[in-house]
Image (cartoon, rainbow, N blue to C red):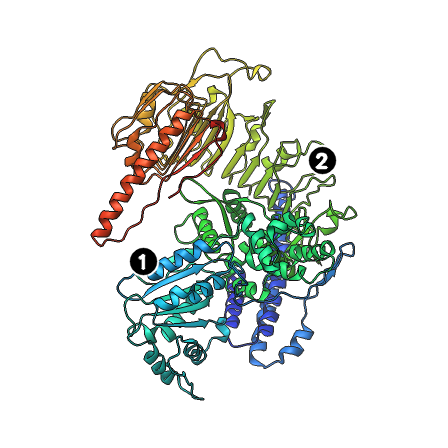
Amino acid sequence: MVMFSRQLSTLRGCLLQERNSNNSAAAIKILENKIINFALKTEHDLQIQLNNFLLAKHTIHQEEASQKLNHTLQEASESARELLKIIESRSSNEVDDDDEANQTQPSNTWLKHASVANVESDGSTSHGFLKPEGRMVGRHSDCTVIKNQLFSCGPGLKIISIVGMVGIGKTTLARNVYEDPSVASYFDARGWVTIPPPQHYNKSGMLSQLLQSITPVEEPNVIKKGSTPHELEMQIRKCFGGKKYLIVLDNITSKETWKQARIDIIRCVVNNGLDGSYILLTTRHYFSLDVHKKRYHIHKMTLLDQKESWELFCNILSIDEEHLAPKFEKIRNHVVEKCDGLPQLIVEVAKRLSKCNNIQQGWKKIEKELESLGLLDRNALSISYNMLPHRLKVCFLYFGVFPKRKKIPVKMLIRLWIAEGFVKPWKHKKLEDEAHEYLQELTDRSLLLIEDRNCNGKIKTCRMHSALHSFCVGEAQKEGILCAVNTQQHSGLSLKAFTNSCRWLSSYSHSFDYYVLFGTNIPRSIFFFLENLEMFVPPKLLRVLAFDTSISLQRVPVQLGGLVLLRYLSITQWFEDLDDVVSNNPNLETLVVSGNGAPTIHLPSSIWKPPNLRHLELGNSYMVDPPSVAKENLQTLSWAVRPINCRKKVYNKFPNIKNLKIFLKDDIEPSHIGGCCSNPIILDRFDYLEGLEKLSILVSIGCNAALPKLARFPSGLKKLKLSGTNISEGDLNVIGMLPHLKVLKLENAFHGTIWKVADGRFRQLIFLLLEAKELKQWEHSWNEFRMLRHLVLRSCNSLEQIPISFAEIYTLRSIDLEGCNSSLVISAKQLQQKRRSKYFKSIQKLVRDGTETWAQDLMLVTGASCQENWYMLIE
């Protein structure tokens, strides 16, 4: 085993050495294919034998299974030794790459499914920068922000970075700012350099390009043939010396490219220009520029909304929107949806449609291309993809298992990555923390869109843009690891036909073509986003089995068995076969059964058997008796319990629990659940759960639950949600003393008429949701809620005024009123006006003192129940 591990390390080293060498891409690909084919076969054989060994454990067949496992390991070691010999002989003999490529093609054959129509593509055009045709659409505020930054004076050279995904219009925005008359007159000299990909970067070429672009041209910038970089630098210094300048560096692809451009270009001019000079970057990648933050501004570009998208479409076609031709109106919603707010797609679609005589037929062809290919410059996407480290490439490709435009909960995504083995432990970091860093890296590279953030500002849900998704699926298919099957669109297809075609098998609705790699590549992961009467689960090697929450399994025969390697199981409802799968599985880490509603179902206690279980989430319709032994690995628990099980002796069984969600139900017969609970339920203390960070207690309707007189919670608690409880003002004062509490949600939990917040409470609270129908008076001084950012008041029908002291909370950014009376809306507006007046006075004073600052006005959102439309008041 030790020898085999060393051989694998040597193979990995050979591949890394080859990638860093000057060998051709074809030669590197040949080596990759050999190692990949070896790795896939070895993993397959070993996992088959490991699966058999686990099934035979503690039986009379255990010794035989152990011998077969050892034999397979020896065969793998011998194969690795032979592969290393081939690589060594290859390195000592020069081999023609073309001949080698022809002789060593992978044995697997690519076949296209005959029932899917072929899509003819005329390729994707790289626009460089799209010079505005007429007026620029949807970017006026972006232009204003950038220009205001450029016009702000300050010592030294400053840098502005325009960041966004491929095709979002970074270069277009930079060009509009660059050519704006006010900008042209403000700067004494301007220059523009388009940075090529790293493999084509050339210092002399960059300096020559900058020299030729300098405006205004007072005298011709003659570049002598054969000029050295030093001579070019001297000419550039002369042009920018003693002037206030603006230089645009377009298309910075990485931190390394920035460092090189900084050495080659910026060094020439940084000490020669006047204060107020600027460097303007366009890039897809957030990265540190190693400059002082006061000299660096990041401008994040966003997608166009529906109105802006259609406005741009009409602008390109020169259509008067007020007299819009009916033939374009019919496809309006389709264009807006499929282009997904990305300007380059909208421009490309508009240009192609302008050449079509039959708009409907032309659109059908373009729509097919949009869904299958994405219509973005694949070279640009390939550069972004190829620059990813290996650990991020597989995480990027994994988004292909989800349907297009699918909002993906980050919690689920992180657990899937860990179950798949993508996340490797690093020093003393937790796997979840490492996975979050992977996600942030993909986001920083503009490869993911953030849909929602939680109250702490962390990413809650994300998705991949539809154009990137098409690229992602294509790359995953080329690697032979993904097959996305749409059995609803092609009824003749059978999922069983794809059992040996890929690593990840996903069933969801789509209209793009897919290719199948036939070979011995049994799926390790299966995802169902469609209901299908022939849902099947191949046994033995499956790691992940996930059903979308919208799928009903009542009439679907799902056969499970022998899934001892399963690590992640997410299903919509419990059925008998699951008992054997769960109870006999030594590797299961995540189990989610998402069914909600009535009647309540009692699950078998064998659910606690998996020794590595880390996350157990059951819907509120499932009950299970507590475990008989401590579950040391359990971090997340969501379950329905009766009050008798909501006690210290139960929760001591979960010493490392971090996230606990309790659906509290009355301790009566299931047939009577939902009836009135006459005796109040006194909840237990939870302070003994020292590692608990999130706690949710949801009491069923009809039950009466309250905290104990000496209510206590873990000191490390960060999020607390109470729903349907009956807590007192004293309980709130205890909660307010928690030193790390950032999120508090009280949903019909406080029934008092007066809440006088005790001094110094809720010092770290960021988010407060208060649903209190009986609350009439709320008293608060300046010393509480000092870090509050978001306040949500829901159904506070008796409350007429928000404490005016909330105007003193500098951090407060929004007040959301849902189902509140009109007097509370008026109170919120008055608070907003007071805060606004206070800010403006402070800003004027700071300006007089010469101090730079910013202040965000308070946003107020009110619900339609107040007989008003939703609106925002932003200065």
- Name the residue nearer the viewer: 598 or 832: 832
In the visual, does 812 lie left or right of 364? left
Q: Residue under label 2, please give it.
A: 556
Circles 1, 2 touching at the beta carbon (< 8 Å) = no
Residue 425's place in the image compared with 59, above or below, is below
In the visual, does 754 lie left or right of 204? left
Q: Which kind of residue does numbered mark 2 sit on?
A: Val
User: Residue 111's quadrant in the figure?
Assistant: bottom right
Q: For the residues marked 1 and 2, what is the alpha-carbon distance in whole angstroms?
A: 58 Å
What residue lies at 25% left-to-right and 33% top-to-bottom?
783
Q: Which kind of residue does numbered mark 1 sit on?
A: Lys
Q: Residue 618 carries which label?
A: none
Label 2 crowding class (10 Å Cα cut-off): few <14, some 14-19, many 20+? some
What residue lies at 60% left-to-right and 55% top-to-bottom?
314
* One can see residue 739 in this view: no
User: Residue 435, percent across and down?
Assistant: 47, 50
Q: Residue under label 1, please give it.
A: 293
User: Residue 821's quadrant in the figure?
Assistant: top left
> Number of marks in the image?
2
User: Residue 657, percent across and down?
Assistant: 43, 35
User: Quarter of the image containing the C terminus?
Assistant: top left
- Name the residue nearer the viewer: 538 or 305: 305
Residue 626's place in the image compared with 21, above or below, is above
Q: Is mark 1 on a helix, strand or loop?
A: helix
Disc on the earlier residue, 1 or 2:
1
| 1 or 2: mark nearer the eye | 1
User: Residue 28, percent across and down?
Assistant: 57, 71
User: Residue 688, percent across and down?
Assistant: 36, 29
Residue reaching furthest to the left: 849
Label 1 crowding class (10 Å Cα cut-off): few <14, some 14-19, many 20+? few
